[in-house]
Amino acid sequence: MASKVYFTNMRVKGDENLPDKLKRLIRTAGIGEIDFKGKFTAIKVHFGEGGNLAYLRPNYAKAVVDVVKELGGKPFVTDCSTLYVGTRKNALDHLDIAYEHGYNPFCLGCHVIIGDGLKGTDEAIVPIEGEYVKNAKIGREIADSDVVISLTHFKGHEGTGFGGALKNLGMGCGSSAGKAEMHESEKPVVDKEKCVGCGVCEKNCAHDAIKVTDKAQIDYEKCKGCGRCIGVCPLKAMRPGQENGCEVLSRKVSEYAYAVCKDKPAFHISLAIDISPFCDCYGNNDAPILPNVGMFASFDPVALDQACADLCNKMEAFKDSMLGEKCACGHDHSDHFHTLHPDTKWEAGIDQGVKIGLGSKEYELIEL
């Protein structure tokens, strides 16, 4: 059966502003069907890495917070810490950057909680019958919540093709150990002919797993497989060790997303705006690859990701962008995310979500 995905563009009329339009979208999509009264409600967002300006403005999160509070819920905005070098590797630094980016109680009207504790080790084990995952390691504060809402910035991603609701839920809610489990298939190998020993990978490794002399050398006992070295290598001398590493990553992410939503009400929102080619986890962001598409909402995160991808793929790439440059070089225009990141397979995450019963890739698009 097709799932309902509600959509609106970024145009406004009269006195309505964009946060108000988002409120109208999620109310129309049925968020009020959830019993929020007295319920701890985790609103999962990405606060953005320091130096990155593509992350969602906190005004959108406040709009969701306002609606949850109107419905009697007890919302908190949350994310889990990272595996790699940056400003979000522990709860204190993570809160610093969240507050700097406007994700603070004064702007949001609710508390901000890092979901996996001070050092990323506070986790709950959620058993599932996945193909790849049997015991998902989820940030405890998120696992302890009564309701989960994902608020996602839809954009490109070098490991999963794009970062949508499934990525925001699955990878984003995993503890440090959970993230390492998902990334296991992405442990890199070095193309010695391409590597020039520039050292960018070593500087970006949070686990002291890479040493560069004339070429990069990887200590696989230390490597967590986070994939940062693959993304930052300017000469593409790093690649996943497994031939289907990106596909496995996408499938594991979907199974983790299932674990996050298991046995509790969940609602999902995606904003396909400022669509950058890479994740908001980097300390910078390249120019948007596509025009703003709009705002989406659904009870089904699988259908939501499929709808976002479909509508993005109908857009024409900005010429002065990473995607536009690739299109100008004769790359296939039919799938922007494959064009951007040819080694990825985003469809695998969608298929896995369908397979485990998380959602459907068949959807009815309902436009406001």
Image (cartoon, rainbow, N blue to C red):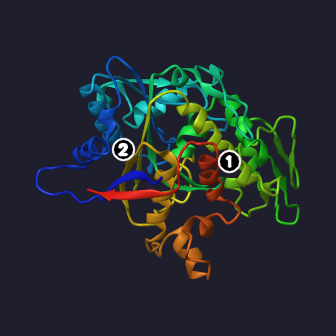
Name the residue located 54 percent from the left edge and 60 percent from the top edge.
277
Q: Is residue 197 left or right of residue 42?
A: right
Q: Residue 204: x percent and y percent?
A: 69, 44
The residue at 68%/47% (across/down) is 251
Q: Earlier in the sequence, mark 2 or mark 1?
A: 2
Residue reaching furthest front? 1
> Mark 2 highlights which residue?
57
* In the foreground, 196 or 305: 305
Amino acid tagged 2:
Arg
Residue 311 in the image: x percent, y percent? Answer: 43, 65
Placement of the C terminus among the 4 image quadrants: bottom left
> Residue 96: which disc?
none
Q: For the residue carrying disc 2, how many other residues have a C-alpha within 10 Å: few (<14), some (14-19), or many (20+)?
A: some
| Residue positioned most to the left | 14
Residue 48 in the image: above or below residue 73: below
What x and y, as percent, mark residue 258?
Answer: 59, 37
Q: Return the residue nearer the eye: 169 or 362.
A: 362
| SS assignment at label 2 | loop
Q: Which residue is mark 1?
A: 251
Looking at the rendered structure, the kind of residue marked 1 is: Arg
Q: Is residue 270 above or below residue 144?
A: below
Instruction: Look at the image and tell me whether residue 187 can be seen.
Output: yes
> In the image, residue 211 lies at what x, y percent?
84, 44
Residue at 73% x, 49% y is: 248
